Image: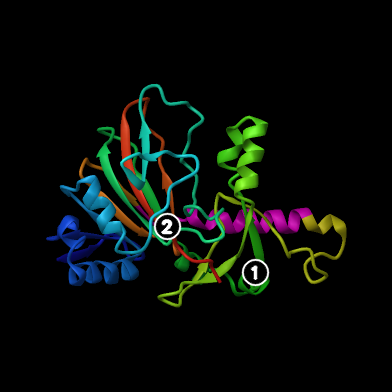
Amino acid sequence: MKAAPLTCHIGAELSGVSLAEAARNADLFGAIRSELLKHKVLFLRGQDLSRADHIAFASQFGDLEDHPVAGSDPDYPGLVRIYKDENSPPDFYENSWHADTTWRDAPQLGAVLHCIECPAVGGDTMWANMAKAYADLPDHVKATIDGLKARHSIEASFGARMPDEKRLTLKAQFPDAEHPVVHTHPETGEKVLFVCGFTTHFTNFHTSDNVRYGQDFAPGGANLLSYLIGRAAIPEYQLRWRWQPGDVAIWDNRCTQHYAVMDYPACVRRMERAGIIGNKPY
């Protein structure tokens, strides 16, 4: 197995390895996991990966979970089908910087995404290194956000396009989660900026240190959150992957964000993702 870095700060392409074999070979899986912790996102071309192999490989990281909005394969629980075609609704969008399921109390550890069918051109996916995004923050910003917490909402994202009754039912099932704005990666020890497209507001910003008058609250908190979310858009922290059928991406959701580029016309794009249950950030 060889790992070729794709940028200076994130991503590597693996060659000389089969994920179907790694699903049943503990040593090979361990080597892949080590590369993932190092590079944060891994890519493999031309994988002959059945759904059973896909589930078996991803399950080496931990238990898998279904998604309450995106449907899973009925024969393979935990294998979420992200399917689009010429008739897909135009308001089903993915082009927002986010880490998966941060609206859960315990967001995903990571995911394994298999490309089944994709546009000939367009439909790339981008990833950003949010540990680097934190490390490069000015010291005064790091001091300001130290100890801050924020809310993450499925209601304000997936629920926004639902009828009110369905949206409120979704919120009752998945109440907003609260996470630290900066969390510590449990395996690498890196500090990670942990706000994204699911984040709605800070929950402990309104203190005398930050807000002298009531008029300070909205611009102070909202502008800071907007600035922090925007850090994912800095090109130096990113990579961009052009999909081919048979490609697989493996990413660490605890220290990255991703963005599915919707620059393609109405057409078939079929991706299958196994999301791994994680732990509560700290």
Where residue 232 sits: x, y (%)? 49, 56
Q: Residue furthest top?
A: 87
Task: Identify whether 169 is placed above or below 221.
Answer: above
Tell me the quarter of the image containing the N terminus.
bottom left
Amino acid type shown at disc 2: Ala
Is 68 or 213 nearer to us in this picture?
Answer: 68
Is 249 or 22 nearer to us in this picture?
Answer: 22
Element on which disc 2 rests: strand
CB atoms of marks 1 and 2 within 8 Å: no
Left or right of 46 in this view: 10 = right
Task: Identify whether 269 is placed above or below 236.
Answer: above
Magenta stretch: give its range.
218-239
Where residue 47 sits: x, y (%)? 17, 49
Q: Main secondary structure of the magenta part?
A: helix
Is 237 or 87 nearer to us in this picture?
Answer: 87
Q: Which residue is mark 1?
A: 145
Instruction: Check residue 80 for magenta coloring.
Output: no
- Say which mark, if any, is on residue 128: 2
Distance CA(mark 1)–CA(mark 2): 20 Å
| Residue 242 seen in the figure | no
Residue at 21% over, 40% down: 245
